[in-house]
Image (cartoon, rainbow, N blue to C red):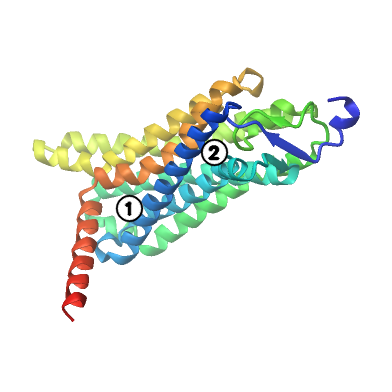
Amino acid sequence: MDHTNISAVTYFIISGISNDPMIRVLIFLLVFIIYLLTLGGNLTILLLVSLDLQLHTPMYFFLCNLSILDIICSTNNLNNVLISFLSGDNTVSVLGCIVQIFIFLSMTCGELLILAAMGYDRCVAICNPLRYHMIMNGRTCALLAIACWLLGTVESIPIFLELLKFSCYKSNMVNHFFCDIMPVLTLSCSDTHFLDLYILTIGVGISAFSPCAITFISYVFIIGTILKIRSTTGRRKAFYTCSSHLTVVILLYTTLAIQYMRPHSMVNLDSNKLMSLFNTAAVPILNPLIYSLKNKDVKAALLRRMRFSILKIHKESKI
């Protein structure tokens, strides 16, 4: 693409994961199934929490927020794979691409903050159980959730505004299956020093490190309290209450660290696509699975709703 065409870019072409027709079919089927499972799993969590009074606790309130973030993020990131395969159109406008980046970054930042809030909630529950309901009251939980959503959005606005200023691209071929920040920065021939610095300082230093530090400190207190419990049963029960959250935190931070804790010039986009596919497709479905499989309250609530539905159908059939 010559310089004249570079400055006139109005749309991007999303290359996808593979150009092989058979592999594309397999990827489409895999992504479609995972997306349906993500929607089903997270919507089930939302439905269970809203219908079951025993799940009206701070932990499940934050879990609902996490489910909403996962649904939005999955829909935002996977729609290119699904739409391009069905329609054959793998193009997206420059503005549409930038909006997709903004939504992805906002939801990811919000998810890290929600996980930090959940870590704080588990810390209060284990370290200060007698004052738990007074500290983690409805107002506190609502304010924490609002702060997580707002901060996630505010932190991503400078990146959105800076990307709008870009007027020069070496190519309009995005080497990814959705519009992500790193592939777009690699294409830009505009000055990216501000964004490089912002991502490494605000993105990694604040958006990722701050919630990570809050989560880490929470678990330092949690582990300290658990070690003071004399009975083995008591220690096991205390750890069990936060094992699901800890699993999700480790999973998410590991995948994000591998993807983004490098300057964009050092990023291998082809290998990053596979990690990104796992992060954007598999992690959101793992969240409800982890919380349902490792959590007795969720399993008990699901069984109660199933029994209620069966009894209702049975009564209606008798009538």
- 34 displayed left or right of 129: right
- Seen in the picture, residue 116 relative to 272 is either above or below; the reply is below
Whether 35 is drawn above or below 52: the answer is above
Secondary element at tag 1: helix
Q: Position of residue 116 (x, y in %)?
A: 42, 43
Residue 98 occupies quadrant: top right
State the residue lying farthest toward the bottom: 319
Residue 307 sits in quarter: bottom left
Query: Which residue carries the number 2 mark?
Result: 207
Q: Are marks 1 and 2 in contact (CB under 8 Å)?
A: no
Disc 1 residue type (three-letter): Met
Which residue is most to the right? 4
Q: Of 247 and 187, which appears nearest the observer?
A: 187
Using the rendered image of the protein, determine whether residue 209 is visible from the camera's viewpoint.
no
Q: Residues within 10 Å of mark 1 (few under 14, many from 20)?
A: many
Q: In the rendered structure, which disc, 1 or 2, sits on the residue that comes first in sequence? A: 1
Q: Tag 2's secondary structure?
A: helix
- The residue pinned by badge 1 equals 59
Coordinates of residue 235 in the picture (x, y in percent): 15, 38
